[in-house]
Amino acid sequence: MSINQSVSRRNFIVGSAATLGGFSLGFHVPFPAAALAQEPASTLPPEINAWVVVKPDDTIVVRIARSEMGQGTLTGLAQLVVEELEGDWSKVTTEYPAPGENLKRNRVWGSYSTGGSRGIRDSHEYVRKGGAAARHMLVAAAAAQWGVPASECAAASSVITHTPSGRTLRYGEVAEAAGRQTPPAEVPLKDPKDWKIAGKPLPRLDTVEKLTGKQVYGADLKLPGMLNAAIKACPVFGGTLVSFEAAAVEKMPGVKKVVKVDDRSVAVVADTWWRAKTALDALPITWDEGPNKNLTSADIRAMLAEGLEAQDAFIGNSQGDAKAELARVQAAGGKVISATYAFPYQNHATMEPMNSTALYTADKCEVWVPTQNGESSLAAVAEAAGLPVGQCEVYKLHLGGGFGRRGNFQDYVRQSVHIAKQMPGIPIKLLWSREEDMLHGAYHPTTQAKLTGALDEEGNLTALHLRISGQSILAHVRPEGMQGGMDPVVFQGLTASLPEGHLAYTVPNLLIDHAMRNPPVPPGFWRGVNLNQNAIYVECFIDELAHAAGAEPLAFRRKLMANHPKHLAVLEAAANGIGWDTPPAPGRFRGLGQIMGFGSYVAAAAEVSVEDGELSIHRIVAATDPGHVVNPAQVERQVEGSFVYGLSACLYGECTVAGGRMEQENFDTYEVLRMAQMPAVETIILPSGGFWGGVGEPTIAVAAPAVLNALFAATGKRYRTMPLKNHELA
C-alpha cells in the first residue's frame, strides 16, 4: 500500500503529536520483523537490516534516527549497535534515515525525538537488537557459503571464522548475501559486563569533521540556485502583522521578493542573507501589538506572588498532613522556617540560530533542517505545504545546539515552507537573525516557590510544604499530556516514587503543590526543564533547615535520606570527592546539592570564595548514577557542559519583559559563563546497573544549589532569586 493511501496528512500530524517532545509519556517502540528484513534494492541502498549497511570494503554504516546536537548520542548509539554486531569500530560511519522513509517502513527506526535525555535510554534495546540481528544474518550467510552449521562459526571485529577449519570471511564479502537471510525471531543481547565497544571511552565519530570544518550545519547549507531569506515577526507576544511597504526595498541590491509569511511575520528573499537582512531592516512595517503591549516583568512577578498564597493548587506529592503539623508547631511556639525563592525566564540561545531550507513544487516539498525531531518537522512541512505526507520529506542535519528549542517547536520550519511556496522550484534558506532568535523563543518558564518547614526539639524535620507558583509548559506545548488539569512535568525530581525523578527525603508530613499561573510569554522545554529550579528550591531550603537546626548540612541530609540509598550514594561520592570532612583552604567554602531527574541520580559539591564582592567558583565535584554508561568519556563531557549551562543560568541568565516583549536581544545582555570563570570539574561515575538514566540534562540542576549553598557558607547570606548578577555579594 502506498504512503498516500495508508496515512493521511492530518492523521499523521495528529498521531505524531504524542511523540514530539522530550516527555513522550509511555511511548514504546516494539522490535518489528520489518526492521530485520532487507527492503527491495529500489527502495534503499543494500542493507542487512534497517540499522546496518555493510559495504564491500567492510565500511559499516549505522543508521541513527536520533539527532546529534553536541551531546554524543550519535556515537553512543553507534557503539551499542556495533557492540552487538561484533564490528570493526575503525570502519564505522553513520547516517540519518529520512523520517518519510521511516513512515513508509512502518516506523522501523522508532522515535525520532531527541530530548529529555532520552536519545540512548529510550532506544538502547531495539538498536542493540538491530546490531545483534545483523551479526546473526552475517554469520548465517558465511555458514551457508561454506556449507557448515552456523553454530560452528563466530564473529569478531567484522570477521567471521569457521572455528573447526580456521577459514575466515570478512563482513563485506558476505553482506549482500546476509541481507537475503531470514531475520532471527529472537536475538539475545550481551550482558553489559561483556561489552568491548560499548562502555568504553571511544572518541566521538563526529569530532574530525567538526574540527576540519567539513561538518555542514543548517546555517552552512548551500544548494544549487538557492536564495536566502531573512524574517521579522512582531516582537510583542501575541502581536500581529498589519502591513508593510514592499516597494520601499524591492529595488535594493540582490532583493528578489518581499513576502508575507504568516499573520505575524514578513520576510525578504535575496541572493545573499546579508542583503536580505539589510533590506528587511529598511522595510517599513506596521504592527498591531495586541493585548500584551504593556506587559512587564513586574506584572508577571505579581501574578506568581499571588499564586504562592492561593487556596487551590494541584498536588504533586503528599504524605501525612503538612499544613496541620505546621500550624500545630507554629501555635506551640516551635521552630517554623519559611523562605521564598524565584527563578526567571531563560532563553535557549543556541549558537546556531533557527534555520530551515525548503524546496517547494506543486507535487513535492523537501526541507533540510537541524531538528530534534525529524517526524515532528515532517508533520510541520506537510501541514504548511498542504501536501500529503508521502509527497514531503525532511533531511536532518547536525544541530548547532538544540536544548529543547528545536524539538516541539517547528515554527521556523513552517515559515521556510510558507516562503518557498511563494517561489516554487527555488530552494530558499531561511535563517533567523540572533535578535529574531532571542525575541521569539519558547522560554524556560518563570516560577516562584514558597517553602515552609517545621523542626522538632531534636532538630528533626517533621513537616515541609513546598508551593510552586508559575507556568505550565505542557499547558502551552502539549495540553494532551496534562493529567486532570495538572502538569506533571512541574514536579520533576519532587514526586513520591516515579522512576523519572523522585524526592530523596522522607518527611512524615509533606505537601508539594503547584498554583498554575500562565503569563502570555510562551514557555518551552529548556535543557533540564523544571528540574533546574526544583533542585534550587529543595536543596537550598534543606540547607536553610540544617542551619536552623544547628546541624551539619551533610549529616542533616543523611538522616532524611535513609530510605533513598541511590540518592545518598551520589551525594556521599561528591562530598568525599571534594574532601567534605577536611577543612578547605583559608577563604574557601563548600556547598552541596543533589537531585534525581531524567532517570538518573546526581549530586555536586562546590568550593567557592568571595573577595571584594566577586564570586570565584574554584572546583565542582559531580557524581552521577545513570544505571548504565555507554561512553564514560562522553558522560564526563556532558557533565562539564551541564555545569556551563547551569552556572550560566545561576550567575547571569535572565530574560525580562518590558512593553510586552523580551528586552534581551543578543549575548551582550544575555550573558553566559566565560572560559576564565569555568571551575575545574571532576566527574565521578557510579553506574549501579538495572536501569537506564539520562546524562545530558540531570547534572545541570545541581550546579546552582551547590554554589548557592557554598555562597551562604562564605557570606552568611541566602540568595534566593536568580541570577546572582542582580545581587551585591558581601
Image (spheres, helix red, strand yellow):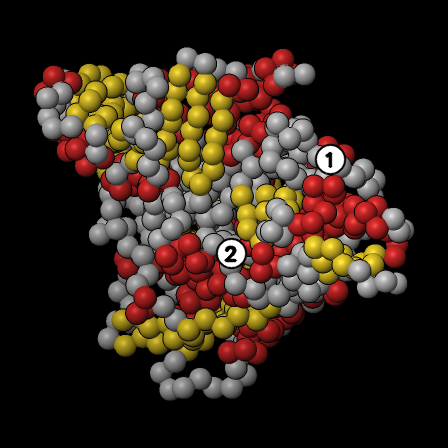
Q: At numbered mark 2, what does the secondary structure look like: helix, strand or loop?
A: loop
Nearer to us in this view, 669 or 399: 399
Q: Which residue is mark 2?
A: 205
Residue assigned mark 1: 37
Residue 446 placement: quadrant: top left
Q: Position of residue 527 (x, y in %)?
A: 46, 49
User: Which x, y percent locates residue 569?
Assistant: 65, 69
Image coordinates of residue 602 in percent, x first then y, are: 57, 62
> How many dots with numbers?
2
Residue 156 in the figure: left or right of residue 422: right
Q: Nearer the viewer, residue 36 or 652?
A: 36
Q: Amino acid at mark 1?
A: Ala
Position of residue 687 in the picture relative to residue 271 (left or right): right
Residue 613 versus residue 366: which sits nearer the camera? 366
Looking at the image, is mark 2 or mark 1 earlier in the sequence? 1
With respect to residue 216, does 223 lie above or below?
Answer: above
Identify which residue is drawn at 63% across, 48% down: 56
How packed mark 2 is, by other alpha carbons closer than 10 Å (few <14, some 14-19, many 20 or more), is: some
**Does 147 appear above or below 165?**
above
- At x 68%, y 31%, the residue is 39
Checking the image for residue 464, the label placed there is none
Q: Distance between the Cα atoms at labels 2 and 1? A: 27 Å
Q: Which residue appears at 39% of the width and 65% of the height?
A: 718
